Amino acid sequence: MAEKERRVGTVSRGIRCPIIRQGDNLEEIVADSVLAAAESEGFAIRDKDVISVTESVVARAQGNYATVDDIAEDVRKKLGGETIGVIFPILSRNRFAICLRGIAKGAKKIVLMLSYPSDEVGNELVSLDKLDAAGVNPYSDVLTLDKYRELFGVNIHPFTGVDYVEYYGKLIEECGAQVEIIFANQPKAILSYTDCILTCDIHTRKRTKRILKEAGAKVVCGLDEILNASVNGSGYNEDYGLLGSNKSTEDQVKLFPRDSQPLVNGIQKRILEKTGKKVEVMIYGDGAFKDPQGKIWELADPVVSPFYTDGLVGTPNELKLKYLADNDFKDLSGDALKEAISESIRKKSGNLVGHMASEGTTPRQLTDLIGSLCDLTSGSGDKGTPVVLVQGYFDNYTN
């Protein structure tokens, strides 16, 4: 009997799990939760399925936490504890405010330099229209706080209702440090105020550090170098430091997970032993996509996926079906068109870079694409699905 044609392609399922606590056996919990969901919902695990685990439960199981006092001690040790330039932070209560508390506790004065009109991930301080009306050039002009207020007044974040300029300024003062706020986009602008700089940008940090060091800064440190080793027994991340951290309590941050390659490999092995199927496994944080309404680029983590199994290395290698239908096989229809396209897919090259029939497919890392799908599936609130099972992602029209 002929095999029944599959009518469904990629499926993304949020998998409910127990609440994860420090010390829990995450390898066992994740694998068993996926298998329980498959039994409950009546679907089968297949080869090349992808099990994705959100970074927050991995860090929680690891107990990868640190306090604001741990941050303060590391900042004092690495930046001297006097006047520190804190440049290019993102505008976030969850992501940066708790870190700023620790930074301020480790200094006598903070010169806070904010990029404008928005931060690195798109949170807006002032609109481009207001910049145009004021005749300000954000690429060259350095604004004091007084000048910013004179030109633009108070600007409330549309989603959080927070004036981050006021919020960050008060937070620094409450932690016992003096504060001076300026607005600039050239890293070297901070050197007019101090030569000890903590650069807080995420994806542009290497360039920023290079520019400052070449300009003669005395000390240049990134957030990725704060808590890159344990302080008084605290958590840490040797690769990313405070980057990727989140607020846990008013005095504690949860750091990005570390040393988790054995975890993803272990989940893969456990599923293989129980089902005979070889799945791929990854840990994911923020997706990489831009909100057209708020202009916010989601990716506040240093990477979408810090750990993943070998089958997730690389980028998609896909043909554009509509290109084939409109060009190569424009005179065909029905079963003849279906068979011609299927044959093209079966015979496609292992590397379609530069091939017209792949134009318009998404040239991004598999982990970035799948991680973005998983982030949207799991959400960041109360869905209770910190694990996502993606099936059929590697299927094509011929499967």
Image (spheres, helix red, strand yellow):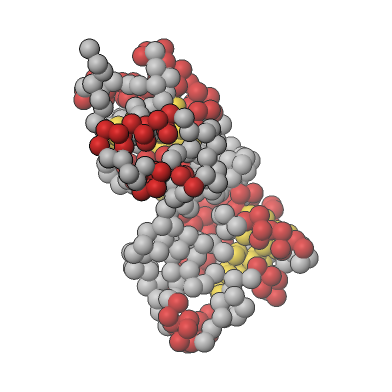
Vertical arrangement, residue 328 with respect to residue 97, above or below: above
Please tell me how many numbered marks the rendered image carries. Answer: 0
- Picture residue at 71% right of the left edge, 63% below the top: 211
The image quadrant that residue 16 belongs to is: top left
- 250 or 4: which is nearer to us? 4
Q: Quadrant of residue 185?
A: bottom right
Residue shown at 57% from the left, 69% from the top? 112
Q: Residue furthest front?
A: 331
**Residue under the point 48% across and 37% down:** 317
| Residue 140 screen position, x and y as percent | 62, 78
Q: Nearer the viewer, residue 305 or 7?
A: 7
Residue 188 visible? yes
Along the horizontal axis of the image, is 124 left or right of 205? left
Give percent across and percent down for residue 35.
Answer: 31, 21
Q: Quick one: quadrant of the C terminus?
A: top left
The N terminus appears in which quarter of the rendering?
top left
Residue 258 spot, x, y in % from top left = 55, 35
- Which residue is found at the position 39% from the left and 47% from the top? 327
Above or below: residue 108 compared with residue 308: below
